[in-house]
């Protein structure tokens, strides 16, 4: 009797997470994009359908005040986890289906939800901390102008203070947010593909990013260029760049966290 093919929502066999993520060559940062394209081309239709469904879901949540934003952040790691399973399916020669978008709602959904909760709590803590620092640096008088009407700010010194406060606040937020982004970058993939626990997955993700700063810088530069090109034709290019980006995250995860023979990620 032929063996039943695996269901898209079925979790793959898990292995112990790799404790020491590998550093890779700088050129791999650009190669992740080409490998993302390789994973996109066998299933163009399903990928675009997944993008459309995901966009509609986010638009619906956007119309729900406060709760919609919270739900969107809670769902994000779960949906990404499902897409990592979809990328693994393509990499194994299996079909990608719309059900992969929701494949994260399985045995590992609880762990993915914990990752989301840690992320939300950390992001809120960072925001409060940055506002507190701005209060110390600039005082309540200047900060109160951030919530004032533009025509009520007439003093040039106050305007300068407000602009400086905004710039410093943005820089401080990015400085503290970057480590958090690094901690969640690979976390969904580690949870669903390696069976890592939430905190361990975030720790491994952070270490993996730190050990590959140069490849990620190249990856980011290429990504910015691709984003500009994708945005020009009325944002329609994102129907392609969105899936390729997701697939590139999977490709970088395979490069850094899995043995070369574990998956069929071709070298470029």
Image (cartoon, rainbow, N blue to C red):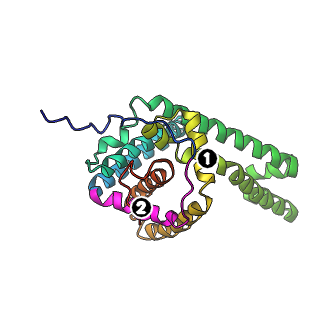
Q: Residue at x 40, y 28 (%)?
A: 107
Q: Residue at x 62, y 59 (%)?
A: 213
Q: Is residue 27 above or below residue 62?
A: below
Q: Position of residue 158 (x, y in %)?
A: 85, 59
For the C terminus, the image quarter is: bottom left
Residue 148 in view in this figure: no
Q: Are marks 2 and 1 in contact (CB under 8 Å)?
A: no
Residue 114 in view in this figure: yes
Q: Residue at x 40, y 36 (%)?
A: 104
Q: Which residue is mark 1?
A: 206
Secondary structure beneath dot 2 equals helix
Q: Position of residue 178 (x, y in %)?
A: 65, 51
Q: Is residue 115 above or below residue 96?
A: above
- Crowd tier of the residue under label 2, counting other residues whose Cα lies within 10 Å: few below 14, some 14–19, many 20 or above: many
Magenta region: 21-42
Q: Which residue is mark 2?
A: 241
**Residue 38 part of the magenta segment:** yes
Viewer-closest of 84 and 52: 84
């Amino acid at each position: 009797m032929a063996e039943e093919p695996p269901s898209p929502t079925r979790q793959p066999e898990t292995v112990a997470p790799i404790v020491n993520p590998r550093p890779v060559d700088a050129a791999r940062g650009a190669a992740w994009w080409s490998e993302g394209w390789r994973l996109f081309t066998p299933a163009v239709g399903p990928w675009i359908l997944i993008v459309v469904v995901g966009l509609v879901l986010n638009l619906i949540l956007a119309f729900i005040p406060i709760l919609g934003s919270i739900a969107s952040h809670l769902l994000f790691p779960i949906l990404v986890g499902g897409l990592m399973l979809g990328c693994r399916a393509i990499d194994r020669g299996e079909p990608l289906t719309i059900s992969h978008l929701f494949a994260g709602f399985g045995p590992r959904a609880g762990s993915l939800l914990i990752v989301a909760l840690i992320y939300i709590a950390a992001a809120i803590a960072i925001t409060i901390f940055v506002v507190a620092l701005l209060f110390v640096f600039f005082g309540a008088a200047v900060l109160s102008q951030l919530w004032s009407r533009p025509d009520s700010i007439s003093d040039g010194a106050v305007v300068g203070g407000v602009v400086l406060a905004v710039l410093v606040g943005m820089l401080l937020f990015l400085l503290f947010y970057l480590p958090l982004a690094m901690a969640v970058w690979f976390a969904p993939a580690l949870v669903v593909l390696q069976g890592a626990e939430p905190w361990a997955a975030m720790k491994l993700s952070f270490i993996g990013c730190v050990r590959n700063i140069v490849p990620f810088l190249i990856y980011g530069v290429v990504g910015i260029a691709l984003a500009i090109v994708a945005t020009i034709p009325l944002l329609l290019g994102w129907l392609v760049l969105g899936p390729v980006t997701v697939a590139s995250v999977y490709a970088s995860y395979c490069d850094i966290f899995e043995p070369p023979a574990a998956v069929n990620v071709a070298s470029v």
